[in-house]
Amino acid sequence: MKARAHIFVSGWIQGVFFRDQTQKWANSLSITGWVRNLKDGRVEVMAEGDKEKVEDLISQLKQGPSLARVENVEVDWEDYKGEFKDFSITHADIW
């Protein structure tokens, strides 16, 4: 079953390669979407793919890369749209 998750991660996560690691995890799981830093210090992720693999990504986000300190992960499940071709690092329009 295909799924889409809109994810917000908070903690000490910006500036520690969190976006790069998220992209590597997503690519290894064949997940499409994007990741970006937000001005409020959180990281936002949009992920689409097989539901089990999206859940695996969420588990990895909860752990974070070795230098990160993840405090909270919020997940909003949405209807799968299939709108992405790959998984990219992007930038918020709010900077």
Image (cartoon, rainbow, N blue to C red):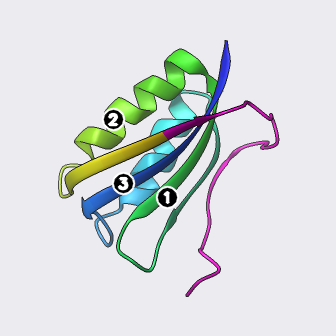
Q: Residues under labels 3 and 1: Cα distance?
A: 6 Å
Identify the residue position indicated by label 2 in the image: 60
Q: Amino acid at mark 1?
A: Glu
Instruction: Identify which residue is drawn at 80% across, 35% down.
Output: 81
Q: Residue furthest top?
A: 1
> Separation of disc 2 and disc 3 at Cα?
11 Å
72 inside magenta stretch: no
Q: Which residues are drawn in magenta? A: 76-95
Circle nearer the N terminus (2, 3):
3
Whether residue 79 appears in magenta in the rendering, the answer is yes
Few, some or many residues within 10 Å of mark 2 (<14, 14–19, 20+) = some
Give the number of the disc on residue 32: none
Q: Residues within 10 Å of mark 3 (few under 14, many from 20)?
A: many
58 sits to left or right of 26: left
Query: What number is the disc on residue 44?
Result: 1
Residue 9, which numbered label?
A: 3
Which element is circle 2 on?
Answer: helix
Residues at discs 2 and 3 in contact (Cβ within 8 Å)? no
Task: Tell me which corner region of the image, top left, top right, bottom left or bottom right, holds residue 89.
Answer: bottom right
In the picture, measured across the screen, residue 20 lies left or right of residue 5, that is: left
SS majority, magenta: loop
In terms of image quadrants, where is residue 75? top left
> Tag 3: residue type?
Val
Q: Disc 3, disc 1: CB below 8 Å?
A: yes
Helix, strand or loop status at disc 3: strand
Q: Amino acid at mark 2?
A: Gln
Is 56 or 7 nearer to us in this picture?
7
